[in-house]
Image: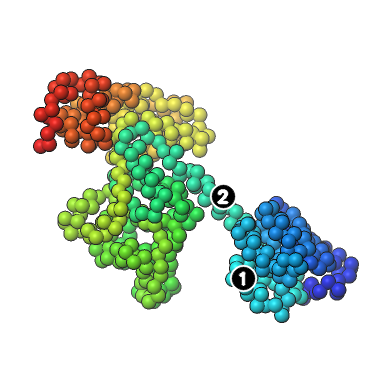
Amino acid sequence: MALLLMEPAVFDENLAWFIRAWVMERAKGVDKKKSILVVEDEPGMRNILSDLAEGLGCEVAAVEDGEQAVARSSDKFDVMLLDLSLPKLGGIEVLRHYRVASPDTRVIVLTAYASMQTAVEAMRLGAYDYITKPFDVTRVEETIVGALQGAGLLAENRYLREELKRRYNFENIIGANVEVQKAYLTAARVAKTDASVLILGETGTGKEYLAKTIHYQSPRYEGPFVAVHCGALPETLLESELFGHEKGAFTNAYTRHIGRFERACRGTLFLDEVGDISLSTQVKLLRVLQEREFERLGGTETIRADVRVIAATHQDLRQAIKEGRFREDLFYRLNVVTIWLPPLRERPEDIPLFANHFLQRFSESYGSKVTKISPEAMEILLSHHWPGNLRELQNCIERAVILADGDTITPDLLHLEKAPASASEPARRGLKSLREVEKEHIKFVLEETGFNQSKAARILGIDRKTLRSKIREYGLGPGIAGDEASDSEN
């Protein structure tokens, strides 16, 4: 039988005692650190609601009017039980204040049946739920517990978002390579905007990590980051994943499916390997980027797409356009800002940095005593071609940490063959300082471009004045430094 909380005059001490005992016996599993504010002008009702909340193991504060409730908003209560009929300041005004001053506080409004219109207004303003008088204790308890659990999830989600924001931070970027530094400088600038971004680079160079960093350092970081690996899905399934579908849209479409564009609302959609999308799907994607709206497959409802799009590919999209495999208009929609991540073999100065970073991470993760990489093992890492880029290096170090018996990663743990020294890749011949690597890399680029300083500077990502300064600094020879004829374009 339901137990009702009537108006204050009905209460006596025996009933109050029974309610306290009953609630204490029933309340289970609610975080004792949660806090509740009871806002009720009737003393008897205020005491009963306070006892009910305390019975759930919560810290409880109680006030008797709206002004006192507003004064306590800085305390950031998890839940507030708010009577809508209050002296000095009405419940609706209190609710409006809390929506701004303490938006995470879940508000349960209390109202008489005759004031239902006010309760509807409270719900419109963001109240979690409403309860009408006389109260059903079971209903009150269930509503409070639901609000507390929701508040806990809200706090946990906020904590996780903040942790992700700290993890995916441009200050955490590893890399001394000039091109990588330029890429992340561009990413840091574009993160503040809503512009579409196209990230280019081989598999394993960290394109998705960069996309997540842009998202979590953008104004959209509280929204979802949703990834779609376009190359892994057939055409019909990809369209359903992107735009969703209605029940009966096609064979086996037994229920409505919400697509990634809807799931990414107010956040970021990451389209990995966008070059693999079919031409028919490209047309639909182009419409979303242009019009910011779409329909589910088999549906007629137009849905607004409040989504920032970041795309990535290892393909040469300009060549794909020439071959008729990729739409030029879609390319320019995606290509508002382009960021290129070089492969690991072109950034040898970063290999020791990443190797030691992965070593520390996996040693901590597995509780391993491995703390260093031998010079011989590092030389092998520097000489390897790394077709899998950072992902391959990460797997290599993880495997070595797992298999190591001592505190050092040795060559036999890498399962990599040392490549022979090559005149075309001088930066990989053993351990060198960054200055030595830079000198040899500049010399290599100059030789490969026929000592054409304009081409060499463009490849190196520096201007010609800086290149000439480097040539003089490293003494690369008068035939390189002073030959202006070699500076003409071929």
- Residue drawn 58% across the image and 53% down it: 156
Circle 1 SS class: helix
Label 1: few (<14), some or many (≥20) within 10 Å?
some
**Quadrant including the C terminus:** top left
Q: Amino acid at mark 2?
A: Tyr
**Quadrant including the N terminus:** bottom right
- Asked whether residue 152 appears in the rendered view, the answer is yes
The quadrant in which residue 463 appears is: top left
Pick the front one: 291 or 243:
291
- Residue drawn 15% across the image and 23% down it: 482
Q: Is 186 left, or right, of 468 in this rendering?
A: right
**From this viewpoint, which residue is outermost toward the right?**
13
Pick the front one: 246 or 186:
186
Residue 7 lies, with reference to residue 269, above or below; the image says below
**Tag on residue 210?**
none
Residue 81: % across, % down = 71, 64
Q: Is 466 left, or right, of 300 in this rendering?
A: left
Residue 113: % across, % down = 71, 79
Q: Amino acid at mark 1?
A: Met
Circle 2 SS class: helix
**Distance from the alpha carbon under mark 1 to that under mark 2:** 26 Å
Q: Which residue is mark 1?
A: 123
Label 2: few (<14), some or many (≥20) within 10 Å?
few
- Residue drawn 30% across the image and 48% down it: 338
Q: Which residue is mark 2?
A: 159
- Residue drawn 40% across the image and 36% down it: 174
Residue 223: % across, % down = 48, 56
Residue 426: % across, % down = 24, 26
Pick the front one: 292 or 359:
292
- C-beta proximity under 8 Å, tags 1 and 2: no
Q: Nearer the viewer, mark 1 or mark 2?
A: 1
